[in-house]
C-alpha cells in the first residue's frame, strides 16, 4: 500500500502541475504561488457552478420537478468526469513518454495501474462534485434533508462518475489507438471539436433570441417541457440516474444498492481489465505512433518541390498548429467565430438581433434603434476585434519550437524571415476571416462599404499590434523547456498578455467610439475606428522590426 500511495501522490502532483500556471524554469519557491493560483481558479469555477447549477435546481423545484434533481445531479457529475477523463487519460494512463521507466520500477503492474486509475477517478469525483453539489444542496434545503437523502447525496457525489469515467477510459484508448494509425486524426479531431463548439455557441444564442422573441410566459412553458422531457429521457436512458432518483424520492434501499454495487463493480472490473491489458494497450499505441510514409520515393518527391524559405516556414507553422490539438483549440476558434457571427447576423439581421433583447441590458424600441443605428454600426467592428485578439498563435510560436529550436537557430535564414513566417501564419488567416465576414455583412446589406472596411481595418489593426507585442516577448524570452504544449499555449505569459491587452483595447476602443459617435456624429466614430486600425498596423510593423533588430534566435 505504501508504494500505491507514493505513486498516487506523484500522479496527483503531476495533474496539479499540468493545471497550474507553471512558468519557465519554475523554482520550488514558486510552488506555493502556483498552487494558490490553481486554488483561486478552482474557486472561481466552483462559484460559477454553484450559481448556474443552483439556479437550475431552484427552477426544477419551482416547476414541480424536484424529484428530477438527483437524476440531473448524476448527469452533471457524470459529464464532468467524462470530460476530465478524455482530457487526461492519454498521458496519465497510457501514451506515457516514460513508459519504459515506469514499468521498470520494482512495483507490481497492478499497483502502477491502480494508482493512475485512482488519480483519474479521484479527479473526476472532485470535478463532478463542483457541478453536482449545488443541485444536491438545493434538494436538501428546499425538498427534504433526512439522513437517508443525505446518504443518497453523498453516494451520488462519490459514485456517480464511476461508470461514465470507466467507459470514457476505454473510449479514450480507442480514440488514441485510432489516431495513432490515422495520419490526419488530429485535424479531424480539431475540426469536429470546433464545429461542436460553434454549434453550442449558435444554439445558446438562438435559444436566447427565440426566448426574447416569444415572450417570458411562452419561453418558460417551453423550458418546463424541455426539462421534463430531459428528466424522463435521462431516467430511461441511464439506469444509475433512475436508481438513485427513485431511492432518494421513495427511500427504497433496493435501487440504492443497485446504484452503489454497479458503480463499485464497474470500477473494479475496469481496474482488472486495464491492468491485465496494460502492456498490450501501450504496446498498441507505441506501434501505431509515428507511422508515416518515409520511403525514399516519398522523400524525393517532397524535397523536389520548389518553395521559398518564407513559404516553407509558413507551411511548417500551419502543420505545427494543426498537429497540436490544444494549440489549435486556443488559436483557431476565433477565426471560426468571426465567420459564424457574420453569417448569423446576416441571417437574423443586425437590427432584429439588437431589438430582440438577446443582448443583456439592451432594450430598444424600433424608433430608438433607427435613431442610433449608426452608433450600432460603429460598435459592430469591435465584436470582430474581440474574436481576432482571441487567436494569437504567433504569440507563443517561438516557444512551440521546444527542443527543436536548434533547427531554427542554425538555419541560414535572417531573423525577419523566421519571425515573419510565424507572424504571417497568424496574420493571413485573421485577415482572411475578417475579409470574409465583412463581405458577408456587406453582401446582405447589414453594413455599407465603409462599415465593411471598418470591420476589416479595425479588427486587423488591433490584432496586428497586440500579436506583435506577444511575438516580441516570446522571441526574447522563449520557453523551450515545456513538457506539455498547454504550458505555453494556455498559461504562457506572452499569449496571456496579448489576450488581456486585446480585451482592454476592445473595451476602451468600443467605449471611445461610442462616445464619439454619440457626441460628434457617426462619422466621427467611423473615423476613429479606421484611424485606430491604421495606427495599429503601423505600430505592429514597427514593433516587429524592432523585435527582428534586437532578437538573436533562438537558443
Image (spheres, helix red, strand yellow):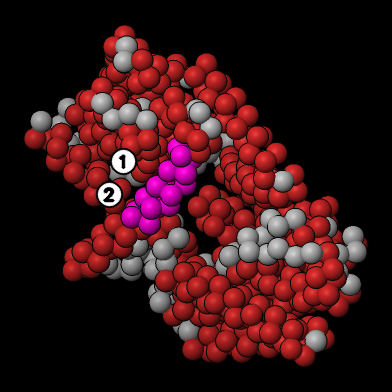
Mark 2, secondary structure of its residue? helix
Rendered position, 517 above or below 261: below
Rendered position, 211 above or below 176: below
- N-terminal-most mark, 2 or 1: 2
Asked whether residue 343 is in view, the answer is: no
Q: Give the CA distance from mark 2 to mark 1.
A: 16 Å
Q: Nearer the viewer, residue 254 or 162?
A: 254
Rendered position, 421 above or below 165: below
Quadrant in the rendering for residue 405: bottom left
Question: Residue 437's x, y, as percent?
Answer: 78, 63
Identify the mark at residue 126; answer none if there is no mark: 1
Identify the mark at residue 14; answer none if there is no mark: 2
At 67% from the left edge and 45% from the top edge, which residue is drawn?
Answer: 216
Question: Around disc 2, counting alpha carbons within 10 Å, would you say few (fewer than 14), some (14 to 19), or many (20 or more)?
Answer: some
Whether residue 88 sits left or right of residue 11 in the image: it is: right
Q: Nearer the viewer, mark 2 or mark 1?
A: 1
Q: Nearer the viewer, residue 220 or 231?
A: 220
Quadrant in the rendering for residue 359: bottom right
At 44% from the left edge and 80% from the top edge, which residue is drawn?
Answer: 476
Question: Residue 223's x, y, as percent?
Answer: 62, 36
What is the magenta range? Answer: 42-58
Quarter of the image with the C terminus in it: bottom left
At 24% from the left edge and 45% from the top edge, which residue is drawn?
Answer: 12
**Is residue 53 on the magenta stretch?**
yes
**Main SS category, magenta section:** helix
Identify the mark at residue 436; answer none if there is no mark: none
Mark 1, secondary structure of its residue? helix
Q: Nearer the viewer, residue 255 or 164?
A: 255
Amino acid at each position: 500500500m505504501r508504494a500505491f500511495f507514493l505513486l498516487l501522490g506523484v500522479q496527483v502532483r503531476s495533474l496539479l502541475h499540468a493545471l497550474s500556471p507553471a512558468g519557465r524554469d519554475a523554482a520550488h519557491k514558486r510552488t506555493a504561488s502556483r498552487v494558490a493560483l490553481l486554488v483561486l481558479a478552482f474557486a472561481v469555477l466552483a462559484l460559477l457552478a454553484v450559481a448556474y447549477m443552483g439556479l437550475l435546481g431552484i427552477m426544477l423545484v419551482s416547476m414541480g420537478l424536484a424529484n428530477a434533481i438527483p437524476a440531473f445531479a448524476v448527469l452533471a457529475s457524470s459529464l464532468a468526469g467524462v470530460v476530465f477523463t478524455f482530457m487526461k487519460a492519454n498521458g496519465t494512463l497510457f501514451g506515457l513518454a516514460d513508459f519504459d521507466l515506469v514499468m521498470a520500477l520494482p512495483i507490481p503492474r497492478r499497483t502502477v495501474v491502480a494508482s493512475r486509475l485512482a488519480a483519474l477517478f479521484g479527479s473526476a469525483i472532485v470535478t463532478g462534485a463542483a457541478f453536482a453539489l449545488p443541485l444536491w444542496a438545493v434538494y436538501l434545503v428546499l425538498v427534504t434533508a433526512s439522513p437517508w437523502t443525505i446518504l443518497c447525496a453523498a453516494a451520488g457525489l462519490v459514485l456517480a462518475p464511476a461508470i461514465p469515467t470507466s467507459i470514457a477510459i476505454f473510449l479514450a484508448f480507442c480514440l488514441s489507438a485510432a489516431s495513432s494509425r490515422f495520419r490526419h486524426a488530429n485535424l479531424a479531431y480539431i475540426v469536429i471539436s470546433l464545429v461542436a463548439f460553434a454549434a453550442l455557441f449558435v444554439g445558446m444564442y438562438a435559444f436566447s433570441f427565440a426566448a426574447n422573441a416569444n415572450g417570458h410566459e411562452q419561453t418558460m412553458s417551453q423550458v418546463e417541457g424541455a426539462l421534463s422531457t430531459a428528466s424522463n429521457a435521462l431516467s430511461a436512458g441511464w439506469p444509475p440516474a433512475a436508481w438513485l432518483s427513485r431511492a432518494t424520492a421513495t427511500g427504497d434501499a433496493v435501487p440504492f444498492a443497485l446504484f452503489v454495487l454497479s458503480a463499485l463493480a464497474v470500477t473494479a472490473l475496469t481496474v482488472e481489465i486495464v491492468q491485465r491489458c496494460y502492456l498490450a494497450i501501450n504496446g498498441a499505441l507505441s506501434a501505431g505512433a509515428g507511422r508515416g510514409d518515409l520511403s525514399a520515393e516519398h522523400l524525393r518527391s517532397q524535397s523536389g518541390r520548389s518553395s521559398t524559405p518564407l513559404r516553407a516556414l509558413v507551411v511548417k507553422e500551419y502543420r505545427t498548429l494543426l498537429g497540436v490539438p490544444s494549440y489549435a483549440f486556443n488559436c483557431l476558434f476565433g477565426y471560426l467565430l468571426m465567420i459564424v457571427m457574420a453569417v448569423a447576423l446576416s441571417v437574423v439581421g443586425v437590427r432584429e438581433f439588437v431589438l430582440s433583447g438577446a443582448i443583456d441590458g439592451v432594450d430598444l424600441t424600433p424608433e430608438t434603434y433607427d435613431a442610433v443605428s449608426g452608433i450600432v454600426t460603429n460598435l459592430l467592428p469591435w465584436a470582430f476585434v474581440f474574436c481576432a485578439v482571441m487567436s494569437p498563435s504567433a504569440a507563443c510560436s517561438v516557444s512551440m519550437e521546444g527542443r527543436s529550436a536548434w533547427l531554427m537557430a542554425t538555419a541560414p535564414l535572417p531573423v525577419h524571415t523566421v519571425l515573419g513566417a510565424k507572424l504571417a501564419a497568424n496574420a493571413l488567416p485573421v485577415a482572411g476571416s475578417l475579409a470574409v465576414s465583412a463581405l458577408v455583412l456587406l453582401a446582405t446589406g447589414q453594413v455599407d462599404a465603409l462599415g465593411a472596411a471598418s470591420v476589416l481595418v479595425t479588427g486587423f489593426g488591433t490584432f496586428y499590434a497586440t500579436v506583435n507585442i506577444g511575438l516580441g516577448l516570446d522571441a526574447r524570452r522563449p520557453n523551450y523547456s515545456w513538457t506539455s504544449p498547454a504550458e505555453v499555449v494556455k498559461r504562457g505569459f506572452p499569449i496571456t498578455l496579448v489576450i488581456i491587452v486585446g480585451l482592454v483595447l476592445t473595451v476602451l476602443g468600443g467605449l471611445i467610439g461610442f462616445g464619439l459617435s454619440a457626441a460628434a456624429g457617426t462619422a466621427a466614430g467611423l473615423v476613429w475606428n479606421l484611424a485606430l486600425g491604421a495606427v495599429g498596423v503601423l505600430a505592429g510593423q514597427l514593433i516587429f522590426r524592432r523585435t527582428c533588430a534586437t532578437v538573436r534566435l533562438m537558443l
